Amino acid sequence: MPTFVSDDAVTLRYHHEPSERSGSTPVLVVPGGPCRGVEYLAGLAETTGGRDLVVLHPRGTPTTGGLSRGWWRDAADVVALADHLGLAEVDVLAHSAGTRLALAAAVQHSARVRSLLLVTPPATWLTGTADDGEQLARARHDPLVDAAVDSLLGPPPADDDEFQRRWMVEAPAGYARWGEAERAHAGLGAVSLPAARAWFRDVPPDAADRVRAGVRSPVLVVGGAADAMTGVAPVESYAAALGADLVMLPDCGHYPWVEQPAALSAAVAPWLRRT
């Protein structure tokens, strides 16, 4: 697996997913989790309209190892990977927690980020809009989803063993339906509590203000209309705050390339071809 060296001399991994138009300028992908093993992105490449993907393996993922410096500082890793690839500017596609890193890169290195495609972003941190995710989940009247929400709303896990157990209990809240394909997908990509905690350290107290004021790149936000992990109203406010185009996918939760790949492709492929 190829590697590159970031600004602090730490080595990170990445991988390249060629498309049927191999040789196209790649889209740089930032996974979520935070710091989840990138296997969970399987199938994403089929939705991106023939653009090659270069997938960053962030600090704290099983393949790169170590711990994040915090998503704000790790923005430098996006620039270091772009430098390694010989790209003056990049289109960034980020999922979930990875959208924070993508926004940090766009603010701190605006000349290097040509566009942002933000998929099911956690949004309340940016605008303070009340989260309606619990309401979406409870409306399903599904005991497994109710148990997932109860766990999500509970106290933080005490250790990594509890974190791992609760990850799978909480998984049904991440999908509009909890079928065989969704259950299989939920098991992809290892996570860890130390990595997740590190992701949120050393973030400037004015980060949200700086993001709202500082993003200059074109932005497309893609949300799931049944995503209990983000809610709907917060994502709408988030997109408005960024001056972004917004597409809400019906009958879709947190993982559109798994749940609604055709609808996701219809939303993102024209955007990526345009950029």
Image (spheres, helix red, strand yellow):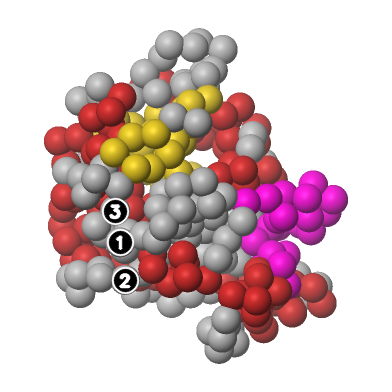
Identify residue for label 1. Answer: 69
Q: In terms of image quadrants, where is residue 9?
A: top left
- Image coordinates of residue 2 in percent, x first then y, are 44, 29
Residue 232, visible in the rendered structure: no
Q: CA distance from mark 2 to mark 1?
A: 7 Å
The answer to whether the residues at label 3 and label 2 have Cβ atoms under 8 Å apart is: no
Q: Earlier in the sequence, mark 3 or mark 2?
A: 3
The outermost residue toward the right is 180
Which stretch is magenta?
A: 168-189
Q: Label 2: few (<14), some or many (≥20) within 10 Å? A: some
Identify residue for label 3. Answer: 74
Magenta stretch secondary structure, dominant: helix
Identify residue for label 2. Answer: 201
The answer to whether the residues at label 1 and label 3 have Cβ atoms under 8 Å apart is: yes
Residue 31 as seen in the image, left or right of residue 256: left
Q: CA distance from mark 3 to mark 2?
A: 11 Å
Please, what is the three-letter code of the amino acid marked with disc 2? Arg
- Image coordinates of residue 176 in percent, x first then y, are 70, 57
- Image coordinates of residue 3 in percent, x first then y, are 39, 34
As displayed, is residue 42 above or below residue 269? below
- Image coordinates of residue 55 in percent, x first then y, are 46, 36
The answer to whether the residues at label 2 and label 1 have Cβ atoms under 8 Å apart is: yes
User: Is residue 186 shown in magenta?
Assistant: yes
Q: Residue at x 61, y 27 (%)?
A: 46
Please, what is the three-letter code of the amino acid marked with disc 1? Arg
Q: Label 3: few (<14), some or many (≥20) within 10 Å? A: many
Q: Secondary structure at mark 3?
A: loop
